Image: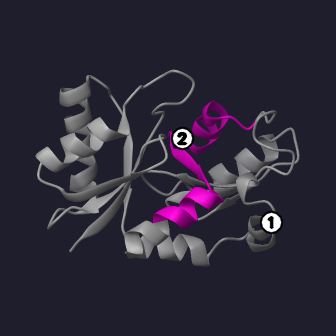
């Protein structure tokens, strides 16, 4: 088995990119992926991709969403091993235990340069903290995400690319789903 975790960007958030998860599971199964399972309604998918690499899986799923649902969605695919490494390297371990909803992981296509993270941290107006992690970033929102000025647009502008974020609870649940 080649289990993969797919994170769909901007699905079922704020009334945009409406995509029922039951329909997504059905379309993914019809496209030849095995055992598709979803978590929550925000575009979290765990499935068996067979012999496809994560990059090829991203392309196939993005094409599937465009054709089947008419949605242009960025999709970020990771392996269970990559998720395990993300969990192990969390620089906000204490905060994750105390307030897991305030710690997020931002998944990216590629690793931005260290200078982009330095510029991003310097541009933050509040108490938020961002730490680099290769093709992802760890973010801590001590005052909550709802009132934060550290928005997806600010992140994309400073890092040079969009991404999709999941809170720590969701990261742990997806890792557990992928582990079986």
Is residue 30 within the magenta segment? Answer: no
> For this rendering, which residue is in front, 83 or 163?
83
Residue marked by disc 2: 160
What is the magenta segment's predominant secondary structure?
helix
Does residue 12 sit above or below 176 in this rendering?
above
Q: Residue at x 44, y 71 (%)?
A: 82
Separation of residues labelled 2 and 1 (CA atoms): 27 Å
Q: Nearer the viewer, residue 25 or 131?
A: 25
| Quadrant including the C terminus | bottom left
- Relative to 136, residue 179 above or below: below
Decide if residue 109 is on the left or right side of residue 106.
Answer: left
Identify the mark nearer the N-term, 2 or 1: 1
Start and end of the magenta stretch? 150-174
**Residue 60 visible in image:** no
Asked whether residue 43 is in view, the answer is yes
- The residue drawn where x is 20% and y is 61% is 49
Give the labeled residue for mark 1.
95
- Residue 37's quadrant in the figure? bottom left
In percent of the image, x 27 and y 36: which residue is there? 23
Residue 159: assigned label? none
Label 1: state its secondary structure.
helix
* Image coordinates for residue 4, horizontal then vertical, percent: 32, 63
């Amino acid at each position: 088995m080649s289990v993969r975790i797919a994170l769909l960007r901007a699905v079922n958030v704020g009334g945009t990119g409406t995509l029922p998860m039951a329909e997504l599971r059905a379309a993914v199964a019809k496209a030849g992926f095995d055992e598709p399972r979803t978590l929550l309604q925000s575009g979290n998918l765990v499935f068996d991709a067979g012999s496809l690499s994560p990059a090829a899986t991203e392309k196939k799923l993005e094409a599937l969403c465009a054709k089947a649902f008419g949605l242009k969605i960025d999709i970020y695919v990771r392996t269970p091993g990559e998720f395990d490494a993300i969990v192990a390297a969390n620089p906000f371990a204490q905060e994750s235990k105390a307030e897991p909803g305030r710690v997020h992981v931002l998944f990216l296509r590629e690793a931005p340069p260290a200078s982009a993270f330095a510029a991003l941290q310097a541009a933050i107006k509040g108490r938020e903290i961002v730490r680099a992690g290769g093709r992802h970033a760890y973010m801590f929102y001590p005052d909550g995400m709802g009132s934060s000025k550290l928005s997806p647009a600010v992140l994309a502008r400073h890092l040079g690319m969009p991404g999709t974020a999941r809170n720590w609870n969701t990261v742990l649940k997806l890792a557990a789903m992928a582990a079986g």
